[in-house]
Every structure is written in C-alpha cells, then in structure tokens.
Amino acid sequence: MSSVTKTQVGVSHAMLRTGVLCAILLFGLLYGCKEPELPTLVKVRDVQLEGLTNFNVVLQVENPNGKKIVISAAHAEVWLDESPLGTVRLLTPIILPKKQEAEVALQLALQFHSASDQLRLVFALATWNNAHTLELAIDVKGRYGIFPFRKKIARTSYSALQTSLGLPAFP
C-alpha cells in the first residue's frame, strides 16, 4: 500500500488549479478573439471636401457587437479604370460603442501616386457616365474589446462594396 504525503497532495491540487486556470484562460482567449461582426452603415450624414485630397465624412453606424470596436488604423488602395490611383488613410481613430447606433466622424486623406493621377480622377469625375470603374482593397486594424483584430477586403469593385456594405453611390 502506498502512502500519500501532504506534499504530494499539495502538488496535485496545485497542478489541478493550474490546469483549470489554463482552461479558463484558453476559453477566454477563444471567446474574446472571435472576429467582430461588421458594423452596419445606417446613413451618410455629411461629406466635406478640403481640396482634392482631404475629406471629412460623418456616418451613422450601428455596432451589433457586445463589445466596443476601436478602429485605430485603416487604409485602402484605390484603382481607377484598372490602374492604381492612390491610397486613402484614416487620420484619426474611431470608436463604435457596443450594441448601439452612433454618429462617427471620419477624417480621411487621399494620397495620389502622382500628379497625373489627380488629373485622371478629375476627368473621370467629370465624365463618370462613361462607365469608369473604381476598385478598392481595404485593410483595417483595431481592437474588439481588449483584443486586437485585423480585417482585410481584397481588391473589389466599389459597386460590389456598395451592395455588401450599404455604401452610398459614387460619385
């Protein structure tokens, strides 16, 4: 018959507690790391242009998630008629409160690849009825609660994004 010492009982309880704590931590990480649902665009409230490269957009957005979403960085590569045009960047972080609709102000900057790309955009806007195409590839980084997340949307047409995300018509 083997005898169990107090030290052995203490070690097995410590191992059990450690195992339970690890299981709880793992469950918390798996639950907390799930990707948030995409917020819903309710309405575009305002768009203000500051020249051709900076603009402010005020949106009414609904966050269906149980945690707030903080978008700390976002950028989109833009193509016009199959040719690279520039990059749009989010200049200031935005916060979407949990489980509610909120008004958010986006400060965006468009950096053209070259001066000729500015002219291409101006001419395209002036002749938009001639079936120009606009495409974007989007990369968003932020936090969902306390956990970081990253969402990428591969290069796709604006009209497809408009349909799937409820964006306004352009131009």
Image (cartoon, rainbow, N blue to C red):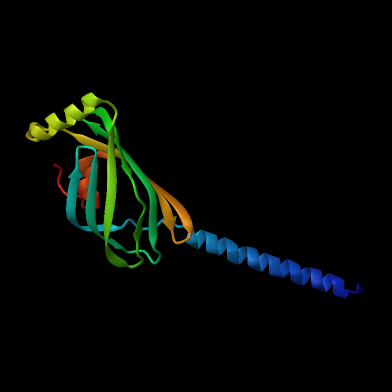
Q: Position of residue 105 (x, y in %)?
A: 27, 55
Tell me the residue at 14%/32% (across/down): 122
Q: Where is the C terminus found, in terms of image quarters?
A: top left
Q: In the rendered view, does 106 fall on the left or right side of 25?
A: left
Question: Which image quadrant is residue 21 in?
Answer: bottom right
Q: Position of residue 29 (x, y in %)?
A: 53, 60
Q: In the rendered view, does 83 fall on the left or right side of 8?
A: left
Is 85 situated above or below 160?
above
- Which residue is outermost to the top? 116
Q: Where is the N terminus found, in terms of image quarters?
A: bottom right
Which of 65 and 108 lies nearest the eye of the viewer?
108
Which of 15 and 60 lies nearest the eye of the viewer?
60
Tell me the residue at 32%/64% (across/down): 64
Kindly tell me whether residue 154 is visible in this rendering: no
Q: Position of residue 139 (x, y in %)?
A: 37, 43
Is 61 situated above or below 128?
below
Tell me the residue at 28%/51% (across/down): 106
Q: In the rendered view, does 74 fall on the left or right side of 46?
A: right
Is 17 situated above or below 29?
below
Which of 168 and 125 lies nearest the eye of the viewer?
125
Question: Which image quadrant is residue 127 in?
Answer: top left
Q: Position of residue 4 (x, y in %)?
A: 88, 74
Kindly tell me whether residue 88 is visible in this rendering: yes
Tell me the residue at 7%/35% (across/down): 129
Question: Which image quadrant is residue 158 in?
Answer: top left
